[in-house]
Amino acid sequence: MKKDELKQKCLDVIDAYRDQIIALGQDTYRTPELGYKEFRTTDRVVQAFRQNGLEPETEIAYTGCKVSSPKKGGPRVAVMGELDCVVCAEHPDCAANGNVHACGHHVQLANMFGCAMGIMKSGVLNELGGSVDFIAIPSEECVDYDYRNGLIADGKIQFYGGKQEYLRRGGLDDVDMILQCHMMEMEDKKKRCTIDTDCNGFVTKTVRFIGQASHAGFAPHNGINALNMAELALNNIHALRETFQEKDKVRVSAVITEGGGLVNVVPEVVCMQIMVRAFNIPGMLDASAKVNRALKAGALAIGGKVEIQDQIGYLPMKTDRKLSHLYRSNMVQYGGADEDSFVELYETAGSTDLGDMSQLMPCMHIWTDGITGGLHTKDYRLDDPEEAYILPAKMMAMTIIDLLYEDAKEAKDILAEFVPAFTKESYLEFMKEHSKVELFDGSAI
Ligand SMILES: [Zn+2]
Ligand SMILES: [Zn+2]
């Protein structure tokens, strides 16, 4: 069958599933759950698949589920929809605990499901040279650390990010590339979607300056002032900013989370949280090492200690240009877009765990419209169900057909050109190596 005929068959099936696709999105919107707590959301996705005779694998990364097309030779493409929500207590649709889908993940799940119906129920797979996974993946937002640290302590997960965790568990071992869409209001109303996204990665630091308490009036000379260490460290960090290069887009943010106790006692312990973001991995590691030096210098000057707990959050994201170009072409051919309908590139300092995946395999991340209001804010609303729920499902399905048609020629070309920064093993090693606790004793020098 010709490629155009396959695509039309697939589009017709997605249209036939329109009500089910929208119902899944709307139901999910009513039960927002944070990362690794998406039990009801996972159940809802499982039900949607079962209703159509597909039995998903469950608990794939603590929560989450997956439906796979039968294994056959050729590349395997994964379509992902994220399960978790954010917290925004001012949003009129938020739950009692403030949870709300203000990042559009409920729409993503509907897109993933709609795409699955199109590919799995139209018979197009018989004519394609590869296979597809449809994955409802947990925990994209990097929040709620106490709960996740509890899961880590209990040995239930090892990573904050659901994609990172799923990769570690081997769930992506036979996946060659990933497709995903997010929803965002287009600033320019003539635009329909943003094709390429590149974004920052980040390291988090939990810092504890440890000094010596003493009476602030009678015997400050016997004390070692942890607040002074922190203050110097912050100034040291500010003095480093001129060494950060434009191309690395470094951002260092710091807050003091514990600043001392009684005012008449020399502060013994002062704690900080620091986030170091950068646009590429060398820039991220360079800035992180400089910040650690600045922290140690603060402790050294006062003769105290500093404990620095480094944790790699997410890695920088680089969209695969060839992959996203296919989506763009389909938008023109089947989505009613014209050449002016696109924002070609969005560079942002925000982060996602799809960034980690993009360092290992080709990944596509499209921002599509159908939404109004800022991401994660009280104004985020679904505006156009057809544009948000249905169109991306169709366009991802069209992209899959392009990739896997004619013995998956397009997918194989993309894979041949892609240069991964890591293998799975070297990625896990890298994450371990750069996520560590260091104690610097400035009193011994
Ligand atoms: Zn978000
Ligand atoms: Zn999101």
Image (cartoon, rainbow, N blue to C red):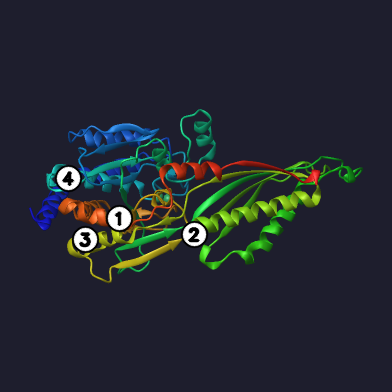
The number of numbered discs placed on residues in the rendered structure image is 4
Q: Disc 1 to disc 3, how far (Cα)?
A: 22 Å
Which amino acid type corresponds to the residue marked 4 in the rendered image? Answer: Tyr
Residue drawn at x 65%, y 51% is: 292
Q: Disc 1 to disc 2, how far (Cα)?
A: 25 Å
Mark positioned earlier in the residue sequence (1 or 2)? 2
Looking at the image, which residue sits at the far bottom?
A: 340
Mark positioned earlier in the residue sequence (2 or 4)? 4
Mark positioned earlier in the residue sequence (2 or 3)? 2
Residue drawn at x 25%, y 37% is: 67
Q: Disc 4 to disc 3, how far (Cα)?
A: 20 Å
Label 4, on which residue? 17
Q: Nearer the viewer, residue 247 or 193?
A: 247
The residue mark sitting in front, 2 or 4, is 2
Q: Is residue 147 left or right of residue 108?
A: right
Looking at the image, which residue sits at the far top?
A: 154
Q: Which mark is residue 416?
A: 1
Residue 109 coordinates in the image, percent (x, y): 30, 45
Mark positioned earlier in the residue sequence (4 or 3)? 4
Q: Disc 4 to disc 1, how far (Cα)?
A: 35 Å
Which amino acid type corresponds to the residue marked 1 in the rendered image? Answer: Ala
The residue mark sitting in front, 4 or 3, is 3
Is 345 above or below relative to 256? Answer: below
